[in-house]
Amino acid sequence: MTISTRRSSVTFTRPFLLKPLTEPHPPGTFDVETDEMALDVNDRLAFRRVDTRITLHQGTSSSTYSIDPADLNAALARDRGAR
């Protein structure tokens, strides 16, 4: 089983809320990592997402949370729509 990690960043221009957060987080640019497991299906290589994480920074501390990519996409859409 091979796991690969894809890294990207997202930017929020307004405070946002993602599960499992209980309060809105201030806007900013944040790192997102997605782990995918390689699958060998009928002689083709396919990938299955197994975990998505976001690292949130506040002051000098940071915390990493496992999140649902659909929740992240919805929060980004709300942020774009709020402009």
Image: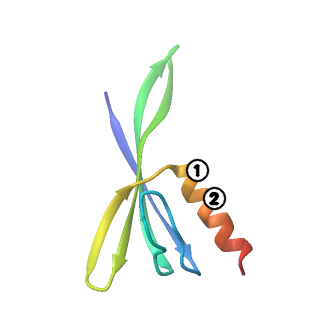
Q: Position of residue 78 (x, y in %)?
A: 67, 68
Label 2 environment density (alpha carbons within 10 Å; few <14, some 14–19, many ≥20):
few
Instruction: Give the number of marks.
Output: 2
Vertical arrangement, residue 40 with respect to residue 58, above or below: above
Identify the residue at horizontal 64%, vertical 73% (top origin). Answer: 79
Q: Quadrant of the N terminus?
A: top left
Residue 11: image x %, image y %?
A: 54, 74
Please state, as top left, top right, bottom left or bottom right, where the C terminus lies in the image.
bottom right
Seen at 41% across and 31% down, the residue is 38
Q: Is residue 47 above or below residue 19?
A: above
Return the residue found at the far left. Answer: 60
**Left or right relative to 32: residue 69:** right
- Indicate the secondary structure of the residue bearing disc 2: helix
Q: Residue at x 47, y 81 (%)?
A: 26
- Of all residues, the one furthest to the top in this rendering is 42
Name the residue type under label 1: Ala
Determine which of the numbered discs, if any, sits on residue 32 in the image. Answer: none
Q: Is residue 66 above or below residue 23?
A: above
Q: Position of residue 9 (x, y in %)?
A: 48, 67
Q: Residue furthest front?
A: 22
- Side (left or right) of 2 relative to 6: left
- Kind of residue at badge 2: Ala
Judging by the rendered image, the residue that carries numbered circle 2 is 74
State the CA–CA distance, disc 1 to disc 2. Answer: 6 Å
Which of the numbered marks, if any, corresponds to residue 70? 1
Crowdedness near tag 1: few (<14), some (14–19) or many (≥20) residues, C-alpha within 10 Å:
few
Relative side of 44 to 82, left or right:
left
Q: Residue at x 36, y 58 (%)?
A: 65
Indicate the secondary structure of the residue bearing disc 1. Answer: helix
Depth check: give the residue in front, 77 or 38.
77
Assess whether mark 2 and mark 1 are in contact (beta carbons under 8 angstroms): yes
